[in-house]
Image (tube, rainbow, N blue to C red):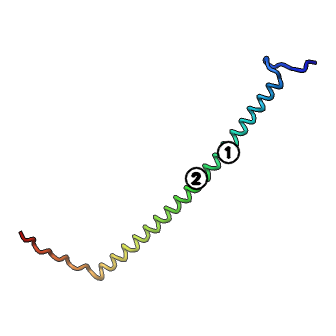
Amino acid sequence: MESKLLVGGKNITDHTNEQQKMLEMKRQEIAEQSRSEREMQQQMLVQDEETLELRETFTSLQQEVEAKTKKLKKYLKVCPPPPLLSLPHERN
């Protein structure tokens, strides 16, 4: 039997080695893509948390504004503001 088999004009051992190299390269690409996807998911989680915190802060600030506005209106009903003093006319 021949020690070398030919496939499409190539030595079968060389052909197999090339395929193994290509397979390893594809595995590395897939691993890199998976790592990249995990990083992106982590970044999205962080952004979601930050967005939630901002919404909670806005809600708290909005509630604070509403409470203080209500308190101010109540105060103005009890104690109306003093009338504005008229300013003396400017002298020429």
Residue that lies at the very extreme toward the right in this rendered image: 1
Residue that lies at the very extreme toward the top in this rendered image: 9
Q: Is residue 84 left or right of residue 1?
A: left
Q: Secondary structure at mark 1?
A: helix
Mark on residue 34? 1
Residue 73 sits in which quadrant?
Answer: bottom left
Mark on residue 24? none
Q: Quadrant of the C terminus?
A: bottom left
Distance CA(mark 2)–CA(mark 1)? 15 Å
Vertical placement of residue 34 versus 12, above or below: below
Residue, x 81% and y 28% (percent of image)? 16
Residue, x 64% and y 46% (percent of image)? 37
**Rendered location of residue 21, percent (x, y):** 76, 32
Provide the residue designation for mark 2.
44
What is the three-letter code of the residue carrying label 1? Answer: Ser
Q: Quadrant of the N terminus?
A: top right
Residue 18 sits in which quadrant?
Answer: top right
Residue, x 9% and y 72% (percent of image)? 89
Residue, x 11% and y 75% (percent of image)? 88
**Rendered location of residue 87, percent (x, y):** 14, 74
Q: Residues within 10 Å of mark 1 (few under 14, many from 20)?
A: few
What is the three-letter code of the residue carrying label 2? Answer: Met
